[in-house]
Amino acid sequence: MNSILEIQHLSKHYFINKEIIEVLKDINFKVKDDEIIAIVGASGCGKSSLLSIISNLLDYTDGKIIYRKPLTFGYMFQSDTLFPWLTVRDNCLLGLKITKKDYPSKEKELDSLLKKYHLDAFKDKYPHNLSGGMRQRVQLIRTILINPDILLLDEPFSALDYQTHLYIADDVYKLVKSNKKAMIIVTHDIEEAVSIADKVIVLSNRPSSIIKEIAINKHNLNPLQFRKTEKFLEYTNEIWELMNNG
Amino acid sequence: MVEQKYHDYLKKLKLEKIIILLSQISITILFLGLWELLSYFHVINSFIFSSPSMIIKTIINLLLQGRLMTHILITLKEVFMAFSLGIMISLGIAIMMYEVPLLAKIIEPFLTIINSLPKVALGPIIIIWFGANELSIIVMALLINLIVSVLTIYNGLKEVDANQILLLKSLGASRYDILTNLVLKSARNAIISSLKLNISMTLIGVIMGEFLVSKSGIGYLIIYGTQIFNLNIVMSGIILLCFISIILYQLILLIEKKQIKK
């Protein structure tokens, strides 16, 4: 497995009026081309900033990011980023429209995804007609359809009820693994991180640096199955301890 | 049981609507009736206060003489020109301010100062600069409608969700993509609000301009009525303005409804 991107000694400061706030300090890690990485840390520690930096949406102060090839990013946010004036179908196709990919050829894929996520009856409805869980699924379809090299998920399941959260996380995992894609998920939910990731990066409080990288060996279990194992508890306890002391 | 309660609820809603409408009609009839009676029995001086029947007679006379339609059409033409120019220019300025935040920071205080200035004070200068013609009327209306529109639209553009912008940027969207696919659409409520403000401001500006320079139009009609001390003409002009204002506002509401449906 090759790494598709490598972050070296990265730091990020915010300059707010006369104040300098150091958010990220000497961050180093690699992302392999079919690896799922979860970044956990307390709220406000700079997790989302790190994701924005990786996708070139935000400048950093120092360090380096090496991209092994030009990457396309599929970003999924914590907040609802559906466009209220577009139907479910048009929201799903938005990514393709912007990236100018050929979307008539994706119609079939869209239909099957809508069916899979029980949204086919809502494809001509507007976001305000959908529940929080349904909206998040539309965002997921929009992200999947552009077939990005790397998925960036910023607390993507936090608005969902617990059960839907588990099922969608499981779906995302299978999808990423079956397509051999890379994914970075940012979360404050330790259980979510352990259940979905191949590697968990634990960040300290601000200025955040990496406390530890923990490789998660799931023995080919998917997230739902892995949650039921002893090993899952061990990992979550270990991270819990690290975060409490960090 | 539920159906009965729902039926009662609908009935209550309908009744409330009827009460409101009937009250509004009664107030209007009462006001007009009282005005007519007071004038008829010389309690008020009909030469100064006119009366509803005299206003109707005046409007019919003006119509028969063929002058009224010309005045209305001229005012409407000026309103239309100042309104469309105002919207186009203010949309352009607001977009520039949004796209170049430094420019916004530089010109915002100037806009606030110009906005707080009573524009009618500029009337004499406008006449000297642009002449005693239709152009001065349109410039006057633009001065009144432009700044408010710019500020309303600009504030609407600024309200766009930062994460939605990030999403489009992460997809590699250009500034033009972001503007057309997101910013303008997300600000459409502000743009419609500015249309509503703009139409009433434009009407004020046009009438003010007609007071100052014109030889035709409803504003001119009102000034002419005052000069020859014919209050029936003055009142007729005001009543016509009310109707024009209602119709133009309803047209904007129609656009708003169409936009919401989309």
Image (cartoon, grey):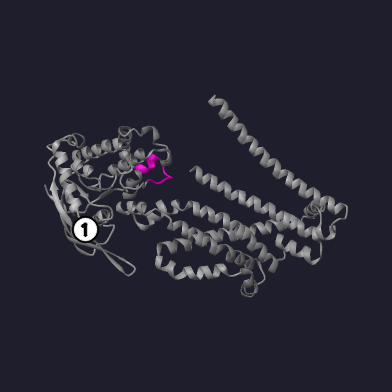
The image shows residue B86 at horizontal and vertical percentages of: 55, 61
Residue at (64%, 59%) from the top-left corner?
A: B203
Q: Residue at x 59, y 32 (%)?
A: B10
Residue A89 locus on image (x, y percent): 37, 39
Name above or below for residue A116 compared with residue B228.
Answer: above
Q: What amino acid type is highlighted by mark number 1?
A: Ser
In the rendered structure, the answer to whether residue A140 lies left or right of residue B256 reads left
Q: Is residue A74 above or below residue A89?
A: below
Relative image position of residue A161 (x, y in whole percent): 32, 38
Q: Is residue A67 visible?
A: no
Q: Which residue carries the number 1 mark?
A: A208
Closer-to-camera residue (A103/B200)? B200
The magenta stretch is A82-92
- The image quadrant of residue A171 is top left
Above or below: residue B143 compared with residue A98: below
Q: Residue at x 47, y 60 (%)?
A: B154
Label 1 residue SS? loop
Between residues A99 and A149, which one lies in front from this camera angle?
A149
Horizontally, is B229 left or right of A207 in the view? right
Residue B234 in view, yes or no: yes
- Residue A207 magenta-highlighted: no
Left or right: where B20 falls relative to B98: right
Along the viewing direction, whichever of A105 and B158 lies nearer the viewer: B158
| Magenta-drawn stretch contains A87 | yes
| Circle 1 residues within 10 Å: few <14, some 14–19, many ≥20 | many
> Chain letter of disc 1?
A
